[in-house]
Structures are given as C-alpha cells and as structure tokens.
Image (cartoon, rainbow, N blue to C red):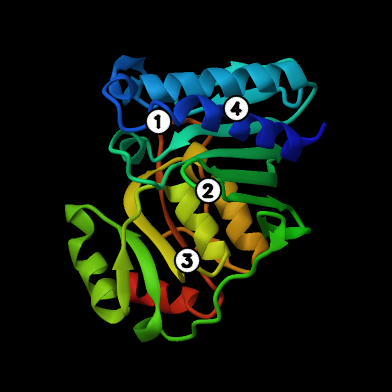
Amino acid sequence: MDFYQTSNSIFTEIRRAVTPLVGTPEAGVTTGTGADGTPTKYIDKIAEDIAISHIKEENICHLLISEEAGKVEMGGDSGTIFLDPVDGTYNALMNIPFFAVSLAYVKNEKLVEGFVGNLSNGDVFSAKFGKGSFMNGVPIRVSDTKELQASAMSIYGKHFQYDRVVHLIRKIRRFRQFGASALELSYVGAGKIDGFVDLRRTLRATDAAAGILILEEAGGIVSDRDGNKLTLPDEVSIGNCLVGTNAHLHKKVIEYLR
C-alpha cells in the first residue's frame, strides 16, 4: 500500500473536479444529510465519491470513516482511513481560497500517515509517524515563537467559552479564523502561524487527524483543552476541543484557557 500516492491521486482528481464548481450555486445544492448530521452539499458529494472510488480500487484500508458517508467497510485487510473530502466547505461555496482534502491512516489505534491537500492553491502537506512532515516535498518545522505576545493563532470558540477565548485573544499578537481545521493545523506545522485552538467541542477525527500528525511530526504539541492527551472518537457525530501549537507556547496557551 502507498498511502501518499493514493492520497495524492485523490487530491489531484478532486481538485480537477471541484475547481469549476467553486463559488457556483450548483456546488451548494443539498444532496442529503451527512453522517455528521449536517447537510451534504453537491461539492462534498462529488469529492467524496472520487475518494471512495480510489480507496476501493487501491484496496488500502479495511474501514473508511468519512464526514458524509460515515463508516464504510472497504476491501483491505487492515487499517482505517479518516476522510474529509472538502475541509472548509463554506469557503469553497463562497470562493474563499482556503479549503482542502484531508486523509489520515490509522493502524492498531495509531496515527500512521497524514495527507492534506490545499484545493485552492495546490499546496500538499504530508507526514508519516517518526519520519517528519513535509510541504510540497520539503521538510517543515513549527515556528520558534516563544512568547504569546508575539504569536499568531487561529482561535475558535462559542459563547460558553467566551471568557477563555477573549482572555487568550487579548494576550496574543494576531488572531485569525481561516475556516478549515486540517489546513490550519498543517500551516501551524509549517510555521506559518503559531497555534490552532478550537474550543467548540465540534472537532472530529475526520476534520483533524491528518493535521494533527502533520503538526506533531513537525515538532508541535497537540492536546485537549486541559493539556491532556487528545482522544478523537471514530464517530463523526462526536466532537472534541483541540489545542495545537509549537512546543514553546503550548503550556502558556493551556494556562490562559483555564
């Protein structure tokens, strides 16, 4: 099995198929309800069908868990792939150039490989456990920013975390929300931003698994809101909180969220 090669083929075909749809009314037509309980848009369905077809043909996993289709048994002997066919669907519908395809391979409950492809500009992020992370084939590392006052972070929260979120936002230098978690985690891994914080309790394994490995293999740290080991259930209807930063900032962010 070559997870990277298969993922790259999926990314290439999805990008070719969805690019003409981006920003069009057709892309946003609701085709059903996804396994996560949210409406499935036409652009999601097109992308997911392409990914499933490739995964079946290459026989690279036993189980596929996707944001739209849910759990699908495949022909492979072992392993699970977590798929988000379009991470950042709203951005794609509005022609905001920040959306991606995300795939992660898990075996024996261990995150082994991750792939995130930016569908808007072609950037490809990949990681393999113990082998580092790459952007367009070049090794990447998290930033070396040491102080919150100098940091730039993506931060998400809802009204019940208002105090925590505002407390952190007031401390950092720049606050951003790009709207595609797998891609944002990958850019943290590449040192483009210093952290990603999501307190909405809606982040699922399909959203984040690939980005988590890319960030960790680039030298970053990922945890839950309290700094503990992060557990993302394999049910797409169940979410969690996530904090991912470089190693210098992680404890400081956790402290400000308490």
First of labels 3, 4 by sequence position: 4
- Specify few, some or many for label 2: CA neighbours under 10 Å numbering under 14, 14-19, or 20 or more: some
Task: Kindly report which numbered mark, 2 or 4, lies closer to the viewer in this rendering.
Answer: 4
Could you tell me residue 36's position as x and y percent?
A: 39, 27
For the residue pair 87 and 207, the one nearer the viewer reads as 87
Q: Residue at x 63, y 70 (%)?
A: 141
- How far, Cα to Cα, is label 3 from label 2? 12 Å
Q: Which residue is mark 2?
A: 231
- How far, Cα to Cα, is label 2 from label 1? 14 Å
* Residue 92, picture quadrant: top left
User: Is residue 149 among what the camera can see?
Assistant: yes
Could you tell me residue 206's position as x and y percent?
A: 51, 37
Residue 138 placement, left or right of 168: right
- Specify few, some or many for label 4: CA neighbours under 10 Å numbering under 14, 14-19, or 20 or more: some
- How far, Cα to Cα, is label 1 from label 3? 23 Å
Q: Residue at x 72, y 26 (%)?
A: 61
Residue 13 circle label: 4
Disc 2 residue type (three-letter): Thr
First of labels 2, 4 by sequence position: 4
